[in-house]
Image (tube, grey):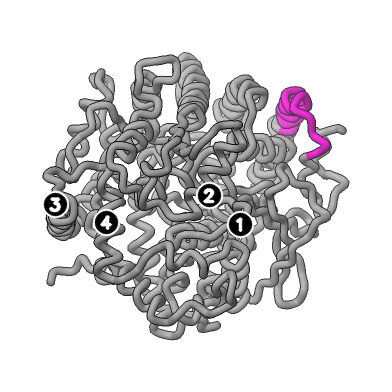
């Protein structure tokens, strides 16, 4: 097939995964880059006076074939990768980086963009057009357009290196995750583990022709083991294995990659006239400056630390009373927290799981979206998939009009990275008289069905599904003209609002009644269990908050300073954790070497945004609670001012339009039980 023709002859113009061969990608990328270069030449070579239409709008719609191929390829590299795809990624990433530099360092093009930008106040532009013009100008200015030729070459070299280092970092983490297996042949060593976990471990061992029970670092295997296994020595073994990913001084070690990435990002920022990488990044965030982020993290740290210390002391005493543990270690945390939670709330995740069959939870998220936004989800089988486990849906509005195509991919496998994320295979935009609707995907790693049980989710997995589905709604309900301002193309510290607010419905009786029924009996989840879920929602919130803040502080410690004198990754990390550390350090472990969010993903100088968005989501959900969690008026306001608007305006303007005021942290502190008692 001709992959360069990205107007696929498929239902809804969906990606024809099964028809694309791995060998198609490299030539397709090269051809798409050549095609995009011609489109750029057409903009720069015209004799017409630069205008918004022939320069800014034309630039916005260049390289659409390249974008489509990139979306397909790099999404597969995360969800269904292989040695071949990884090899192609290493070849392709520098080509794409080079092409990006070709655009931002193109003097003739920048001159035309600047000519339009300098006249922006005299042009009759819509709000969205103003934002696009501003964004296009900054994409040049913030990426070296004003640099001298030799500095531009320096920037190109840095960007090329960074793209390869980030890929290598991610590949090493994935390889380390896949390489570790813990085979247990004596069932007596597995006391405490729920029956479903044992069955899944047995099934995994059988699939690899091994005798016994097999455990891995994949979350559906790792988390239950750390939470329920009575065997402390095995918990320790698994925890240390998880903590020393890419920190072993071997071929998959990431220490040098971390140092190189941090230093190159700093050099890049300096080259562009910024004090640090964080100063560069945060200019385009709601927070604006590293100081504001650090103040925000410190303020929450001050409020959370007393509660965290209380909770830690209580957990330490509980473990001592129960099992004579004198020093609580990291591998004890989830285990004793679960035991304490069960004692205090009589709430066991294993008692909850039968009410959260995966198919029912998916259906529940759809029903909540239907009640709030009038959406309908219909599973369809006419769409090509990249793996047999992927589910595909057609999403329509109250008038039966197509809103989006939705892919859902829920189970772990060797070619898929850990964690959960939302992504897009095709953006929403309007061009001419055609309104292109988006193709949105969510990817998770939940417990697979076994021979005797369907996929039953922990409550944490339920909130994860709702979280990613919230991101998906942000993508699906997009209603902008330009693809670069559509859906989740918003300031990074605003992007988590739609996802985090959606988690709130998981705790509400009215929502749980829509889907939380026992997978065998059909019985609705007992309301006393619902009350216990709500009562326990703030359990150990102090410790959880401290943990999140420590990640944000670690991120800023790499990116908010000059890192060139750092030579020891572990020593640097220990210093960053000083103010938030509860558990003793484990010398074999290092977080930075597998901190994919900041060294491979897009969260560098942005990890704080999870907590930042929690302030927004708690404040926003208060509005729903005041009016009713399915109140149409509030839901419509949220859809019209937040979900559909993408990045067309400053997010605080959008938020205030929805809420009527700026967000206050009190709602979050109240929800988390962190207000002073």
| Count of numbered marks | 4
Place of residue 83 in the rendered image (x, y in percent of width and height, measured from the top left): 63, 23
Q: Over which residues does the magenta segment extend?
A: 18-39
Q: Which residue is mark 1?
A: 452
- The foreground one among 636 and 443 is 443
Question: Disc 4 or disc 3, which is closer to the eye?
Answer: 3
**In the picture, which quadrant includes the N terminus?**
top right
Query: In whole angstroms, how far apart are the C-alphas of marks 2 and 3?
Result: 31 Å
Q: Is residue 28 magenta?
A: yes
Tell me which corner region of the image, top left, top right, bottom left or bottom right, holds residue 344.
bottom left
| Left or right: 521, with 220 as reference point | right
Instruction: Determine the CA span between mark 2 and mark 1.
Output: 9 Å
Q: Which residue carries the number 4 mark?
A: 337
Dot 1 alpha-carbon crowd within 10 angstroms: few under 14, some 14 to 19, many 20 or more = few
Q: Earlier in the sequence, mark 3 or mark 1?
A: 3
Q: Main secondary structure of the magenta part?
A: helix
Q: Which mark is residue 351?
A: none
Label 1: state its secondary structure. Answer: loop
- Alpha-carbon distance for marks 4 and 2? 24 Å
Q: Nearer the viewer, mark 4 or mark 2?
A: 2
Could you say which is closer to the camera, residue 322 or residue 219?
Answer: 322
Q: Which residue is mark 3?
A: 320
Q: Do callouts 1 and 4 mark residues in contact (Cβ within 8 Å)?
A: no
The 10 Å Cα crowd at callout 2, few under 14, some 14 to 19, many 20 or more, is some
Residue pointed to by mark 2: 199
Name which of mark 4 and mark 2 comes first in the sequence. 2
**Which residue sits at x=57%, y=64%?**
357
């Amino acid at each position: 097939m001709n992959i360069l023709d990205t107007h696929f002859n498929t239902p809804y113009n969906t990606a024809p995964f099964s028809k694309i061969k791995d060998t198609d990608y490299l030539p397709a990328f090269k051809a798409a880059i050549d095609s995009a270069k011609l489109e750029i030449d057409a903009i720069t070579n015209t004799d017409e006076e630069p205008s918004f239409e022939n320069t800014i709008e034309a630039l916005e719609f260049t390289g659409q074939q390249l974008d489509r191929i990139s979306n397909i390829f790099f999404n597969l590299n995360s969800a269904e990768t292989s040695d071949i795809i990884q090899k192609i990624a290493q070849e392709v990433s520098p080509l794409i980086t080079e092409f990006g530099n070709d655009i931002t360092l193109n003097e003739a093009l920048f001159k035309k963009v600047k000519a339009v930008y300098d006249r922006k106040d005299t042009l009759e532009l819509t709000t969205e057009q103003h934002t696009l013009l501003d964004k296009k100008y900054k994409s040049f200015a913030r990426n070296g357009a004003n640099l001298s030729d030799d500095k531009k070459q320096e920037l190109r070299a840095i960007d090329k290196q960074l793209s390869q280092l980030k890929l290598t970092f991610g590949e090493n983490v994935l390889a380390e995750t896949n390489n570790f297996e813990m085979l247990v042949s004596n069932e007596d060593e597995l006391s405490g583990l729920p029956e479903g976990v044992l069955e899944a471990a047995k099934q995994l061992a059988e699939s690899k022709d091994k005798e016994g029970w097999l455990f891995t670092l994949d979350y559906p295997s790792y988390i239950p083991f750390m939470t329920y296994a009575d065997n402390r020595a095995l918990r320790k073994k698994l925890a240390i294995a998880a903590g020393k990913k890419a920190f072993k001084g071997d071929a998959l070690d990431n220490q040098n990659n971390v140092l190189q990435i941090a230093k190159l990002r700093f050099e890049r920022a300096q080259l562009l006239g910024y004090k640090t990488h964080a100063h560069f990044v945060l200019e385009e965030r709601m927070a604006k400056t590293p100081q504001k982020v650090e103040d925000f993290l410190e303020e929450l740290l001050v409020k959370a630390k007393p509660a965290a210390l209380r909770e830690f002391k209580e957990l330490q005493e509980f473990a001592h009373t129960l099992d004579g543990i004198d020093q609580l270690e990291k591998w004890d945390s989830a285990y004793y927290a679960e035991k304490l939670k069960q004692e205090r709330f009589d709430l066991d995740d294993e008692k909850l799981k039968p009410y959260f069959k995966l198919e029912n939870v998916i259906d529940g998220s759809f029903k909540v979206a239907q009640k709030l936004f009038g959406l309908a989800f219909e599973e369809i089988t006419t769409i090509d998939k990249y793996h047999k486990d992927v589910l595909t849906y057609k999403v329509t509005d109250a008038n039966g009009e197509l809103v989006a195509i939705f892919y859902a991919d829920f189970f772990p496998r060797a070619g898929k990275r850990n964690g959960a994320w939302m992504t897009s295979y095709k953006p929403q935009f309007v061009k001419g008289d055609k309104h292109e609707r988006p193709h949105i995907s969510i990817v998770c790693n939940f417990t697979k069905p076994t021979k005797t049980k369907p996929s039953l989710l922990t409550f944490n997995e339920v909130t994860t599904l709702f979280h990613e589905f919230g991101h998906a709604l942000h993508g699906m309900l997009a209603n902008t003209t330009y693809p670069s301002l559509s859906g989740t193309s918003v300031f990074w510290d605003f992007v988590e609002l739609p996802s985090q607010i959606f988690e709130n419905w998981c705790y509400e009786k009215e929502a749980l009644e829509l889907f939380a029924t026992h997978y065998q009996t059909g019985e609705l989840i007992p309301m006393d269990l619902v009350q216990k879920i709500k009562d326990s929602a703030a359990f150990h919130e102090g410790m959880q908050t401290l943990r999140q803040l420590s990640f944000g502080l670690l991120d800023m410690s790499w990116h908010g300073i000059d890192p060139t004198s750092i030579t020891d990754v572990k020593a640097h990390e220990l210093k960053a954790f000083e103010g938030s550390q509860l558990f003793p350090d484990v010398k074999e472990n290092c977080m930075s070497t597998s901190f994919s969010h900041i060294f491979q993903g897009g969260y560098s100088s942005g990890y704080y945004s999870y907590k930042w968005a929690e302030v927004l989501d708690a404040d926003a959900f208060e509005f729903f609670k005041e009016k009713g969690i399915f109140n149409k008026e509030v839901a419509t306001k949220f859809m019209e001012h937040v979900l559909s608007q993408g990045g067309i305006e400053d997010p605080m303007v959008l938020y205030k339009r929805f809420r009527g005021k700026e967000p206050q942290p009190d709602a979050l502190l109240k929800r988390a039980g962190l207000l002073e008692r």
